[in-house]
Each structure stands twice: as structure tokens, then as C-alpha cells.
Image (cartoon, rainbow, N blue to C red):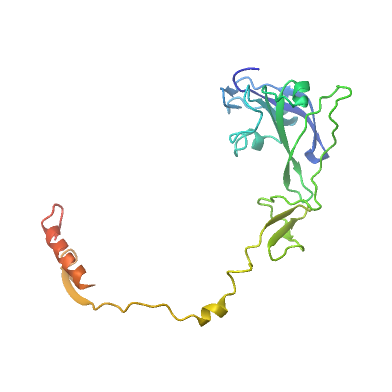
Amino acid sequence: MDKDEWLIVLLGTKQEKGLHIIVDDFYVPREQYRDKAHCRIEDHDPIPLEIFHKVVGALHSHNSMAARFSGGDRANDGLCSTFPMSIVIGSSIGKNDQEGYLLGFEYEAELTYELPCGGLGISNARIIPRGVEDWPFLWEVERPETKGLHVYLGDCSEYKESKDSNTYEYRREAKCGLVETEPNLRSSVFGYNGSRILNALPKPWQPPPPEKKGKKYVDAKVDKEIEYLYYDKEAELMDKWLELARYSDGYEG
């Protein structure tokens, strides 16, 4: 496998609202950027318009590194966000990875698909080679489980509070049936509704305000007399500060 990363664009068709993708061809961007840790399609070498409608995903190599999506792959402008399906492959096949040995590489794959509410979901995916008889890894089109599955709904706006929310857990259920669970911050056993105790407590001690003395200075910049109130010690320090300021560089008094 090449020591630098590389990518190809996968062409084919989508079925089951994006949950089943059939790849029957690929396109190699000729002027893609490549180094040991990055690869991308350059702006001056876009995917040709005549094949754009066939694009179903992208596959890129992590060479000898682990086949796991990096932070760059998952960034807003990364491959996972740019294509409806993304696959990363690597040559470091684990000892117990029978599927990797049969394919010739280890991989990670995920795709986006349409949820019943019309939003987009993200799911892991499996590679099933076409034309291979008796492939030992059984597969079927995976669909999102909805009953009893607690997940993170992210910024989904199509949800309502679930009927099984309780004192300790707040649950929101999306239109598709997915349920998110989080601690119920609106109620707790201790720490709230403590007015009975607070009302019985004496008022906290407050120190009496110190005596104040008035000091008057003239602001030469605006030719206006301004009265300053200071404590005795602060007034003494202010007098010294003003005296030093008059003889310092930059003072305009």
C-alpha cells in the first residue's frame, strides 16, 4: 500500500433511502493533494459534471495507520461530511480480523441516510463484495432501531418529551422513535425547594459602613471641580499619587 494517503470517488446507486449503496465504478481525481497524513480533492480539479450524479461516496487510504476516521475526516469540510458514504482503509490488519484478511485491508465505513422525519441519520456500514459466492459474513440492510434505544439526538428539532421521563431522567423522543436520555436537571432530591430552611435562617452579618470624608480636586482638563469621596487612608494615597503624577512625563495638568 502506498506510503502516502490517497482517495477515490465511488460511483453507483443508492437504495433504501441511502442505507444500501451499490458501488459499480470509481473515479480517481488526478490532481488530488496527498501526503503521509492527508488527502483531499483540490478546488481546481473538481469532480466532472457528467459523473457527479453517480457519486455515492469516497474511499481513502490511511496507508499503514489504523483504519479509523480522523478528526480531519470528520471535520465540517472533511470526507465524512462531504460525501454520503465514506470508507477509510488501512494495511494494519488485526490478528483476529478475519474479514480484513479476506478483503485484503481493514476498514471503517459509515453512511448518511434519510430518517422517517426527513432528517439525516448516520450509521456504520459493512462492505460486501459483489460477485463473491458464499461470502462468510451475513448481512442485511440495517435500519435504525427505535424501540427502547437511547441515543444522542444532537440538534434534532423534531422531538417531544417522552412519557417515561421521571424525577431522575429526562427523555426526549424524536419522530422516528429514537430516544435521548439525560439527567433531569429540573428536579432533584436535595438542593431545590429549600425555602423552609432559608426563611428560618437569620440574616447574614453585615459590617457597618466606615466613615467617609470628602476631598475636592480640580480637573484642569475640563476646568470643572469634581468631588471625590475616599476613606481616610485612600485619600492620603490619592494625594500622593496626584503629586507624583504632576511631575511625571506626559501629565497634562
Vertical side of 149 occupied by 160: above or below: below
Of 36 and 98, the residue lying toward us: 98
Residue 1 position (above or below residue 242)? above
Direction from residue 39 to residue 26 in the image, left or right:
right
Q: Quadrant of residue 61?
A: top right
Tell me where residue 31 appears, x and y as whole percent. Answer: 60, 21
In terms of image quadrants, where is residue 105?
A: top right
Residue at x-position 72% and y-position 58%: 172
Indicate left or right for 33 with 20 as reference.
left
Q: How many numbered dots are placed on residues in this image? A: 0
> In the rendered image, is residue 50 in sight?
no
Q: Position of residue 84 (x, y in %)?
A: 71, 36
Q: Looking at the image, which is closer to me, 147 or 199?
A: 199
Residue at 76 percent of width and 35 percent of height: 125
Would residue 204 be found to the left or right of residue 216 on screen?
right
For the N terminus, give its image quadrant.
top right
**Quadrant assignment for the C terminus:** bottom left
Q: Residue furthest toward the top?
A: 2
Q: Residue furthest left?
A: 247
Taking the spot 81% from the left edge, 25% from the top edge, the residue there is 129
Residue 158: % across, % down: 72, 56
**Rendered view: 113 above or below 152:** above
Quarter of image, res 112:
top right
Q: Nearer the viewer, residue 23 or 125?
A: 125
Report x, y in % for residue 110.
72, 36
Q: Nearer the viewer, residue 102 or 81?
A: 102
Whether residue 68 is visible, yes or no, is yes
